[in-house]
Image (cartoon, rainbow, N blue to C red):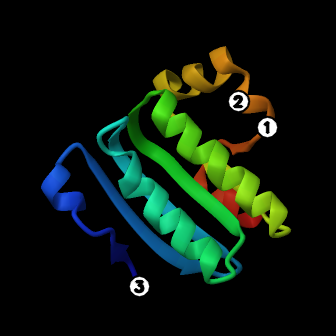
Amino acid sequence: MDRQTADSTNRGRLQVTARTEGRSEVVTAAGELDHHTADLLRVPLDEALEQGRSRLVIDCSRLEFCDSTGLNVLLGARLKADAAGGGVHLAGMLPVVARVFEITGADAVFTVHESLEEALAD
C-alpha cells in the first residue's frame, strides 16, 4: 500500500510515496529535492526508522534534481539507519543526480544500485 506524504501535492515540485516491501521501506521521490521540498522526504524516512524499519531503499529513478539540502536529508537518514543496524540503498539514480553524489563523494557512503529491483534483491 502506498502512503502519500502529507502536503506533497501542495508543493508540486516533489512527490514522495512510501511503502513497505519485504524487509525494506521503499521511498520513491519524484521531482526536485531541494531546500523547499526536503522535509517531504525527511518525514517518511524518519517515520520508517521510528517504526523500526531500518533498511531504507530510496527509488531515485524519477528524482530530477538534488541539492545539498536533499543530500543532507539522505546522509542524516543513513546515519540513523546505520545506527539502527540497517542502511540506505539508493536505486536508479539519473545521471544528473548521480553527479551530485560523485562530486561530493557521497556515493562512497551509500549502497548504490542500478535499479529498484536490484536494491530489493540485495
Q: SS class of the residue under badge 3?
A: loop
Would you name the residue on which mark 3 appears? 1
What amino acid type is highlighted by mark number 1? Val
Based on the displayed image, in which of its 4 quarters is residue 7 positioned? bottom left
Q: Residue furthest top?
A: 103
Residues 118 and 33: in front is 33
Position in image of residue 44 (x %, y %): 47, 67
The N terminus is located in which quarter? bottom left
Would you name the residue on which mark 2 appears? 106
Q: Residue at x 64, y 72 (%)?
A: 49
Q: Give above or below for 69 relative to 26.
A: above
State yes or no: discs 1 and 2 in contact (Cβ < 8 Å).
Answer: yes
Based on the displayed image, in which of its 4 quarters is residue 45 positioned? bottom right
Position in image of residue 8 (x %, y %): 24, 59
Relative side of 30 to 27, left or right: left
What is the C-alpha distance between the residues marked 1 and 2?
Answer: 5 Å
What amino acid type is highlighted by mark number 3? Met
